[in-house]
Image (tube, grey):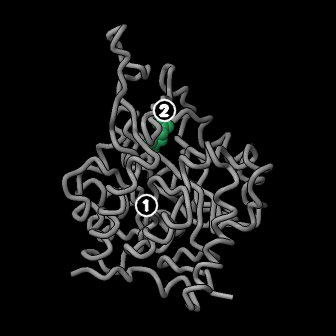
Amino acid sequence: MPNLAVELNRLHLANPILVASGTFGYAREMAAFVPFSKLGGIVPKTITAEPRRGNPPPRTVETASGLLNSIGLDNDGLETFLAKHLEYLVGLGTKVIANIAGHDREEFLQMSGRLGGIEGLSGIELNISCPNVSGGVDFGVDPARTEAIVRGVREVCGLPIVAKLTPNVTDIVAIAQAAQSGGADAVTLTNTFQGMAIDWKHRKPILGNVIGGLSGPAIKPIVLRMVYQVARRVPGLPIIAVGGIGSLNDVMEFLVAGASAVQIGTANFYNPTLAGKLVDELDAALASEGLASVREIVGTLKTP
Ligand code: SIN
């Protein structure tokens, strides 16, 4: 049996298959579909310090090979997360990585300080990349702000830190380097791509917030390119890839490109049993390649 365990600096996972924030609720919703303890980890919906109502509807629209969303971080806030969801999540037999978003650096630090003292959490994913709220991507498009947030969180919180980056930048390598300099254990590549959909007959945007974030198979080749670039240019910074994964072949492509782990996102909506099945399929694929561990395939791309 190949060894599926992966180590992303201080974040250790039993296998590299996680589920992405915003596509898995707080896990209860998915109990009928996924044997949670099989997963490498769960990243629940982004939490903010205070409850947020999110953006006006419509909030989602299907596009060719993708999904546009403008949810706007609708959530009940940190205290309700701790009171209502945490105990359930940490009892599921897999790693739970809390995803948080702050209005500013101070709020990121306050939230991480509070979460750092919580028993059972395995890490924090910093959402410095939400395209659907005012200021959401501002942190993640600026290397200095990215580094400052990660560094501050590292000072106040002992949990492993994952920075979730936005693809809406010219140079993803510069942002990944900044996250590493700040002390991130890993980066998640990537959040959604800014996009829009139009109802031309009514001359109106379809999303209530006009602009949203595109995910799903349409973005996979672009995220693959970013994973490849960061893996080559930022050694020592493990990558969790997320972007249009819908099959084992997609997982293998991301691992070969240099990702140490992956998150299943949009596919949870149309194929909710996929994440659990991928763990078995990965095991079988590595065995058929004669590999003793998943680590042996990470970053093995041969380039001219
Ligand atoms: C949202 O709630 O708008 C989606 C989350 C994100 O893109 O970070």
Instruction: Kindly report the distance in space between the C-alpha atoms of the residues bearing marks 2 and 1.
Output: 24 Å
Task: Give the label on residue 83, or none.
Answer: none
Q: Position of residue 34 (x, y in %)?
A: 74, 56
Q: Secondary structure at mark 2?
A: strand
Can you say which quadrant of the picture contains the N terminus?
bottom right
Residue 183 visible in the picture: yes
* Residue drawn where x is 63% and y is 68% of the image: 40
Kindly report which numbered mark, 2 or 1, lies closer to the viewer in this rendering: 2
Can you say which quadrant of the picture contains the C terminus?
bottom left
Q: Secondary structure at mark 1?
A: strand
Task: Write down the quadrant of residue 178 in the picture.
Answer: bottom left
* Residue drawn where x is 53% and y is 40% of the image: 49
Residue 185 visible in the picture: no
Q: Circle 1 sits on which residue? A: 188
Q: Is residue 39 left or right of residue 234?
A: right
Question: Could you tell me the amino acid type at mark 1?
Answer: Thr
Label 1 crowd bin: few (<14), some (14–19), many (20+), radius 10 Å? many
Q: Position of residue 302 (x, y in %)?
A: 31, 82
Q: Is mark 1 within 8 Å of ligand 1?
A: no
Query: Which callout, 2 or 1, points at the residue further toward the start of the chain?
Result: 2
* Residue drawn where x is 55% and y is 26% of the image: 53
- Residue toward you, 103 or 165: 165
Q: Is 214 drawn above or below residue 169 in the view shown? A: above
Question: Could you tell me the amino acid type at mark 2?
Answer: Glu
Q: Position of residue 241 (x, y in %)?
A: 44, 63
In the picture as drawn, the residue positioned furthest to the top comes out as 202
- Residue toward you, 62 or 5: 62
Q: Is 249 drawn above or below residue 57 in the view shown? A: below
Q: Circle 2 sits on which residue? A: 62
Q: Position of residue 20 (x, y in %)?
A: 55, 53
